[in-house]
Image: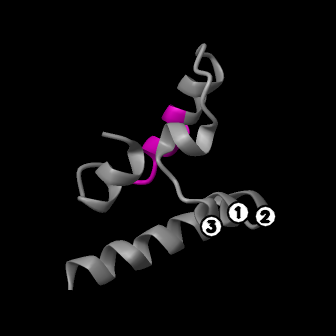
Amino acid sequence: MKFRERYMSFETDFEEIFELTDEWNFSDETCTLREYLGLTAEEEDVWISESDEALEELLEKERTERKA
């Protein structure tokens, strides 16, 4: 299960994304970081063009809407 799936199902918090990014950086993975984390293209764009906080807000908004 990738980060996004675990986050959306409340199995992890946002801070894990930083550990996983480091893990990916030092791995031999051939996939992109977006694929490794399970993020959508829109989420990747927000993360790159805006900030970590903007990505967290976007994910949290979806997660909250799913829970309701």
Residue underneath mark 3: 42
- Residue drawn 46% across and 68% down? 59
Compared across the picture, whether 28 is left or right of 51 comes to left
Residue at label 1? Answer: 45
* Camera-side mark, 2 or 1: 1
Say left or right for 45 vs 16.
Answer: right
At label 2, which amino acid type do we have?
Ser
Residue 24 percent across, percent down from the top left: 58, 26
Where's residue 37, x and y in %? 49, 43
Task: Tell me the element at label 3.
Answer: helix
The answer to whether the residue labelled 1 contacts the one labelled 3, judged by CB atoms less than 8 Å apart, is yes
Which residue is disc 2 drawn over?
A: 49
Question: Which three-letter amino acid code belongs to the residue tagged 3?
Answer: Glu
Between 44 and 51, the one nearer to me in the picture: 44
Quarter occupied by the C terminus: bottom left
The part of the image, by quadrant, that contains residue 61 is: bottom left
The crowding category of the residue bearing disc 2, from other C-alpha atoms within 10 Å (few below 14, some 14 to 19, many at least 20), is: few
The quadrant holding residue 64 is bottom left
The structure residue drawn at horizontal position 24% and vertical position 58%, both measured from the top left corner, is 10
Residue segment shown in magenta:
13-20
